[in-house]
Image: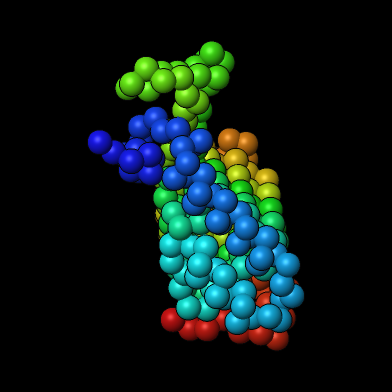
Amino acid sequence: MMTEEEKIFAGVLFCPGDPSLKAIKLRTHNLNIDFNRLHEDETQERERILHEILGGIGEGTFLQGPITFHYGKHTVIGKRTFINFNFTVQDDARVTIGDDCNFGPNVTIVTPLHPMLADERKAMLDADGNTKRFCYAKPVTIGNDCWFGANVTVCPGVTVGDRCVIGAGSVITKDIPADSFAAGVPCKVIRSITEADSMRYKPEILADNRVIDK
């Protein structure tokens, strides 16, 4: 018989009120508070807590805080990623974030889903006939070198490809292919990102700086 956590990863209904899951969430919620109480220059303690919260975090990654992780250990973040203020991850299912990403303020990643019918949201019966509340969850994957503007929401089951730019305020409900500029509610691909987007073609912004030749 699967545990409730195994049911999450299998994509089937699970009971979020199960004591084993509540224990994971309580530990993580308390660690969120510990992290958020620290000053920005208390770097060693902040890093220690992040390693306790997360399933993995790469070298050079920085979370500005405040942060809110639900399970925490279901999230893995790559190397050299910057995450701005008020990052929220409801990581019932797994959340994977790649290397060299940038996230603006107030980005939210959500993995759980609930039954559409109100009666089924209130209660259903488990295999033994016990009345419980259930939900299910779908993983989120974000590739390398992505930039998410402020107030982006990522919905369950979404994959965002490498090198994407997501406009501020977008709600991502479907997969976004690599090298795309996408925005809107719901978020849609506006165009591909190409060499024509290089700062070398914007001298009024580039000023006396230079693009590094590949």
Residue at screen point 43% across, 66% down: 56
- Quadrant of the image occupied by residue 93: top left
Q: How many marks?
A: 0
Location of residue 202 by image quarter: bottom right
Q: Quick check: can you spot residue 164?
A: no
Q: Position of residue 152 (x, y in %)?
A: 63, 48
Q: Nearer the viewer, residue 155 or 35?
A: 35
- State the residue in front, 64 or 72: 72
Is residue 132 left or right of 128 when viewed as pictured?
Answer: right
Percent across and percent down for residue 196 are 53, 64
Name which residue lies at 37% across and 22% down: 126
Looking at the image, what colour scheme do you see? Answer: rainbow
Residue at x 52% of width, y 78% of height: 60
Question: Seen in the image, is 127 located left or right of residue 90?
Answer: left
| Residue 54 horizontal side relative to residue 168, left or right | left
Nearest the eye: 6 or 127: 127
Q: Is residue 164 above or below residue 173?
A: below
Of all residues, the one furthest to the left in this rendering is 1
Which quadrant: the C terminus?
Answer: bottom left
Q: Is residue 106 left or right of residue 142?
A: right
Residue drawn at (44%, 45%) of the image: 20
Pick whichever, 181 or 208, lies toward us. Answer: 181
Q: Is residue 125 visible?
A: yes
Q: Position of residue 37 (x, y in %)?
A: 73, 67
